[in-house]
Image (tube, rainbow, N blue to C red):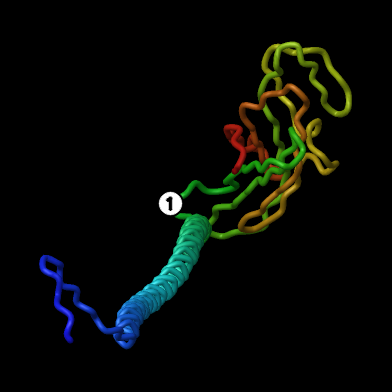
Amino acid sequence: MPLKKPRGAAAVRVVPHQPWRQGLSIAAVVLVCFGGALGAYQLGRSTAELDEVHLASMQRLYDASQRTIEQLEAELIESDLSRGVQEEATQALKQDLRMLRDEVATLTEEVTFYKSLMAPSSLAKGLQIADFELTALEEPGRYRFHLLLTQVESRRDWVQGEAEVVVEGRMKGGEPAQTGGSETATVNGPMVLPLTEIGEGDSYPLKFRFRYFQDLTGIISLPRGFEPERIVVKAGRRGASTQPLSRTFDWAVAG
């Protein structure tokens, strides 16, 4: 006899046990996690590849910049060297030009001098004191002199005689004059020092013998404290009855 359902009681549904559904849920969760991990891996790999490409591009740009810098530095060094060489060449050319101009000036003077010797019609005749030049030596107060004598004649015979040189100046106040190795009294006025006292050598007066010109040289040693002002040169023919020729030069030392 069948049982009757009590009146007023709630109905109860019995669900049968299904274990495969639980496995399916776990599999779905695992699949979702694996897909997420795979997507994250792919995304990370793509990002890493992009970073490597960017890094390689930056490296190539850096290498190219380094090569450009090295090339520019080499060009700068070469430019500096070229400029230095050009400056040295320019200075050398300027020096050569100055030397050539000095040589031309010297040659011009020599040509003029020789022309005057060869064509003396417009010049004073006879023995001439042409020039007197001083050059400073290393020791203070010592100078080398060059005395140039010429003869201006249409018909030149040998001319001979003697030349005298005196230096005029004054002593500084309170300084004793020393000449010829002896000390004299202090002089505060003009002084005249002949070459026999201040010249180094024994061949005084200076003897000459020439037909066209002659250059006489010697050493002058001035006493301490003496200030030279001018030089007086006298030259006369041997046996001549006329007065010796005289010429005065300012004291000027060649550079």
Q: What's the residue at 47%, 49% (across, down)?
A: 123
| Residue 111 shows up from this direction | no
Q: Residue at x 62, y 38 (%)?
A: 253
- 135 or 89, nearer to the observer: 89
Residue 70 image position (x, y, % from top left): 46, 71
Q: Residue furthest left?
A: 7
Left or right: residue 238 compared with residue 97: right
Can you give x and y, in whole percent of width and height, for residue 171 in the image?
71, 18
- Tag 1, which secondary structure? helix
Task: Indicate the position of residue 59 as horizontal and vertical percent values.
Answer: 41, 75
Q: Is residue 6 above or below residue 235?
A: below
Depicted 2 relative to depicted 171: above or below: below
> Which residue is labeled 1 in the image?
122
Q: Position of residue 56 (x, y in %)?
A: 39, 78
Q: Residues within 10 Å of mark 1 (few under 14, many from 20)?
A: few
Specify whether residue 202 is in view.
Answer: yes
Say which of 69 and 181 sits in front: 69
- The count of marks equals 1
Residue sitting at 44 percent across and 65 percent down?
76
- Residue at 82% x, 39% y is 200
Q: Quadrant of the C terminus?
A: top right
Q: Compared with residue 92, is residue 125 higher up or lower down, i.e. above or below?
A: above
Is the N terminus in the top left, top right, bottom left or bottom right quadrant? bottom left
* Residue 95 vertical placement versus 32 (above, below): above
Nearer the observer, 88 or 162:
88
* Amino acid carrying mark 1 in the image: Ser
Residue sticking out furthest to the front? 1
